[in-house]
Amino acid sequence: MAPPKSKKSIAVKKPQPAAAGGRATGTRSRKAASRSLYSAAEVHEIFRRFSVQRPEPKGELDYVNAFTLLVAVVLSAQATDAGVNKATKALFAAADTPARMLALGEAKVGDYIRTIGLWRNKAKNVIALSKALIEDYAGEVPRDRDELVKLPGVGRKTANVVLNVAFGQHTMAVDTHIFRIGNRIGLAPGKTPEQVEQGLLKVIPAEYMRHAHHWLILHGRYVCRARKPDCPACVIADICKSKEKTTDIPAPLVPIAPLDETFAAEA
Ligand code: SF4
């Protein structure tokens, strides 16, 4: 869905010479390949514009607490957020704590999530992680990535989402959209999600880290799409250094209603 049009765009300062934000350390050859193409001033301007567009960006998964967020993210692997939300509405009404989930049992959890891909394995993981939370963490979701990734079905990306969204930590969960943007526009090039994650953590100003994950996902999902980036609808088209971009003229910078995001299709 294209962002709404506005009356005027916000002027951008000319890029300044490369600043400290993207400074490489250590071995030159490998590190140089993953260096951001953008100066600190340019990165700041990119995120300033995203923050004007979406002052309070939200993820599209429904949840009621850290535990249900964790479950929702586990269920969302290879599934759409809308599909997960349909299934979890009733599931979370029945069980919103590890103890209640465990009491529900694998078969019943499976019944609730049958419409989601890989549901059998996911039901198993939801029960196993609920059990582990009760036995090892007093029923609380740990606020530490090393602990989170020990839970069944929880990888680095899931842990980063939970730490960022539930606990406000400055983590960067690199999904397919963020990985593409990091490489396509050269913001944080990398061969693996973890390289892109490290590159982004290095260049994004601290003041924007709280929401950077959502801004990049939404930008990738609705504007800088996989097959054909919608450059005329892009608010950073003048700053972007992608060879794929089709215009240098940025789209008008106006806030986008969350409703637009809710009903747009997955890219
Ligand atoms: S100008 Fe095009 S390629 Fe660059 S970020 Fe915007 S949509 Fe993506």
Image: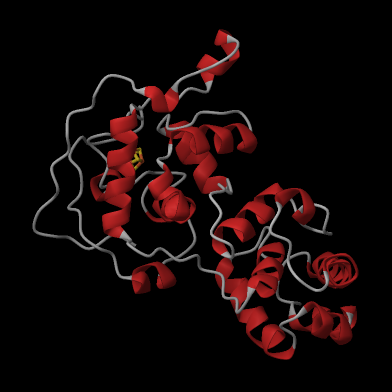
Q: Is residue 63 above or below residue 209?
A: below
Residue 194 appears left or right of 112: left
Residue placed at 41% from the left, 53% from the top? 215
Left or right: 45, with 101 as reference point:
left
Q: Residue at x 74, y 51 (%)?
A: 155
The reply, left or right, for residue 173 in relation to residue 159 is left
Q: Is residue 246 above or below residue 86?
A: above
Q: Position of residue 132 (x, y in %)?
A: 88, 66
Q: Could you tell me if residue 217 is visible in this image?
A: no
**Residue 114 falls in image quadrant:** bottom right
Q: Position of residue 190 (x, y in %)?
A: 56, 28
User: Where does the image place residue 203, in percent across and percent down from the top left?
Assistant: 44, 33
Which quadrant is home to the N terminus?
bottom left
Q: Quadrant of residue 2?
A: bottom left
- Of all residues, the one furthest to the left in this rendering is 7
Quadrant of ligand 1: it is top left
Residue positioned 83% across, 72% down in the render = 138
Q: Quadrant of residue 118?
A: bottom right
Q: Tell me which residue sits at (73%, 90%) in the image.
A: 94
